[in-house]
Image (tube, grey):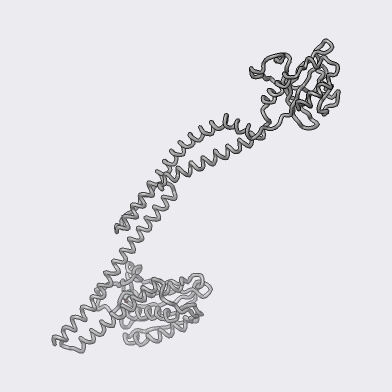
């Protein structure tokens, strides 16, 4: 269902419920109201007309006769002394003779069919009185009677005023309130229609634009952005969509770069393998053994690249299984440096190791060894003969630092931020490339998987480089470690 119709339906439902609750509340109020007096007045008036009150008043047994009328007609009859406002007779016996009574006259005109005979407003009075001892309200018709020459007494026919019945309340409701409620319903309905239309415009339009942009992106247009408009929630959706779009675009670009790099880096060794093997086959190679050596090295490099790429993909996807155990970093650092001493000596590089005891970290020993091997062999690789490499361990800020410093070729400031990217190599054209450009990307991933970080510093080209690996100590590592 369209948003607009849902909104309209919801508004109408709320309107209906509100009016319904109001109607029920009114009905309840109406029902607890005292019953309207007019039906009782009419009944009492008809009764009074059918009784020969003046006749009874003239006779000596007046009270007895009034008592008879009360029983026969099922009505309360009182005789009241109007001058003193006291009851002289009460057929119900609630008022004792001589008890005070306060008759409250009411302005009421009988409907015309009843206005006949002796009963007129001049001698017939309608009204009510309270019977305080019983907490009752009584409605009455009083007829003045002439006795002993002066009119000072009244015969009072009375009936208790009850509460309004549900039926009467319903009639009242239908007469007075229902038309009002219907009018309110119509006005409310029109307002709901206009409002739902306005709201659906402000919500649905911007949402439609987001949907359009999403469809565009699904069709491959990654530049697609949604206009940020409408209420805050819809703007948040548009913003989130745009951010997602930007990320998809970046990922897409990274993917393309990655593919370009992989194909380029695979192509170079493959070309040289093809060239040298062709030369051997054609008998054109002056030194077939040397050519075979190159083919062997290039194949080894290809192999290394495939292994490193697989490692990197696994690390980045979080699928590399790590075997966590306590690792003594001073011991590990000395062992790796020891292993690489030969490589340093071959290049006439002095390697100094200052592995101070720094305690254990929680990590994967093999992966941490891979990190150290990579960093130390890089230091040796990028340091000219006669240079120095310094490897040390130190206690650091809630963790430990492993520092690998060399006096080598250094790294230019513009390259420092990029050397941890996949395939990034400083000055690719410089000399025969033996590396893959993947080593530092893998190192970075492994260090991060341990909850640590790696930083590279260099004063500039030709001024040596310093790589520092920070690893959290076990207490901190449980909190920081990624996996
Ligand atoms: P590679 O296989 O090329 O060594 P790495 O990812 O290990 O790849 O390193 C990326 C680049 O960072 C290298 O090509 C090199 O230019 C630079 N680099 C790494 N370590 C050092 C260092 N100790 N001194 C100078 N440059 C370095």
The vertical placement of 432 against 480, above or below, is: below
Labels in figure, total? 0
Question: 475 or 345, which is in the foreground?
Answer: 475
In the image, taking residue 394 as reference, residue 222 lies left or right, namely left
**Residue 465 visible from this viewpoint:** no
**Residue 130 visible from this viewpoint:** yes
In the image, taking residue 84 as reference, residue 342 lies left or right, namely left
The vertical placement of 235 against 337, above or below, is: above
Residue 68 is situated, as x and y percent measured from the top left of the image, at: 81, 24
Residue 425 is situated, as x and y percent measured from the top left of the image, at: 30, 73
Residue 18 is situated, as x and y percent measured from the top left of the image, at: 54, 40
Q: Quadrant of ligand 1?
A: bottom left
Which quadrant would residue 22 be assigned to in this image? top right
The vertical placement of 427 against 56, above or below, is: below
Q: Residue furthest front?
A: 72
Residue sitting at x 51%, y 70%: 479
In the image, taking residue 394 as reference, residue 105 lies left or right, namely right
In the image, taking residue 410 as reference, residue 276 lies left or right, namely left
Residue 401 is situated, as x and y percent measured from the top left of the image, at: 46, 75
Question: 345 or 219, which is in the foreground?
Answer: 219
Residue sitting at x 41%, y 41%: 197
Question: 209 or 100, which is in the foreground?
Answer: 100
């Amino acid at each position: 269902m369209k948003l607009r119709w849902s909104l309209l339906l919801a508004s109408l439902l709320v309107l209906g419920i509100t009016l319904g609750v109001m109607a029920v509340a009114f009905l309840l109020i109406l029902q607890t109201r005292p019953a309207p007096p007019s039906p009782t007045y009419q009944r009492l008036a008809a009764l009074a007309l059918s009784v020969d009150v003046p006749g009874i008043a003239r006779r000596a047994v007046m009270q007895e006769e009034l008592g008879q009328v009360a029983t026969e007609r099922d009505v309360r009859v009182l005789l009241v002394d109007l001058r003193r406002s006291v009851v002289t007779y009460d057929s119900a016996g609630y008022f004792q003779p001589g008890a005070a009574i306060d008759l409250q006259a009411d302005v009421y005109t009988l409907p015309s069919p009843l206005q006949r005979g002796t009963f007129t407003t001049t001698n017939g009075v309608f009204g009510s009185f309270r019977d305080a001892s019983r907490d009752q309200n009584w409605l009455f018709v009083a007829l003045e009677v002439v006795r002993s020459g002066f009119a000072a007494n009244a015969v009072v026919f009375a009936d208790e005023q009850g509460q309004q019945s549900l039926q009467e309340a319903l009639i009242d409701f239908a007469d007075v309130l229902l038309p009002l409620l219907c009018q309110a319903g119509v006005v409310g309905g029109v307002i709901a229609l206009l409002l739902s239309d306005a709201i659906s415009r402000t919500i649905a339009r911007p949402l439609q634009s987001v949907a359009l942009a999403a469809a565009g992106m699904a069709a491959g247009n990654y530049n697609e952005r949604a206009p940020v408009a409408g209420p805050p929630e819809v703007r948040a959706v548009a913003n989130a969509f745009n951010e997602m779009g930007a990320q998809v675009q970046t990922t897409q670009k990274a993917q393309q770069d990655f593919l370009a790099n992989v194909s380029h880096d695979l192509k170079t060794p493959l070309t040289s393998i093809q060239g040298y093997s062709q030369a051997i086959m054609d008998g054109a190679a002056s030194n077939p053994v040397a050519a075979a050596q190159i083919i062997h090295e290039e194949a080894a490099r290809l192999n290394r690249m495939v292994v490193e790429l697989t490692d990197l993909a696994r690390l980045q996807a979080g699928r590399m299984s790590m075997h966590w155990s306590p690792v003594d970093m001073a011991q590990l650092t000395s062992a790796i440096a020891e292993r690489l001493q030969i490589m340093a000596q071959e290049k006439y590089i002095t390697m100094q190791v200052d592995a101070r005891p720094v305690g254990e970290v929680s990590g994967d020993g093999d992966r941490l060894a891979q990190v150290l091997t990579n960093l130390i062999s890089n230091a040796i690789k990028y340091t000219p003969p006669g240079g120095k490499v310094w490897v040390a361990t130190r206690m650091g800020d809630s963790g430990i630092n492993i520092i690998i410093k060399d006096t080598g070729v250094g790294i230019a400031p513009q390259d420092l931020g990029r050397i941890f990217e996949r395939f990034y190599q400083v000055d690719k054209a410089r000399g025969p490339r033996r590396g893959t450009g993947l080593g530092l990307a893998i190192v970075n991933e492994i260090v991060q998987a341990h909850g640590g970080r790696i930083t590279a510093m260099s004063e500039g080209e030709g001024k040596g480089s310093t790589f520092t690996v920070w690893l959290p100590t076990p207490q901190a590592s449980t909190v920081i470690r990624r996996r």
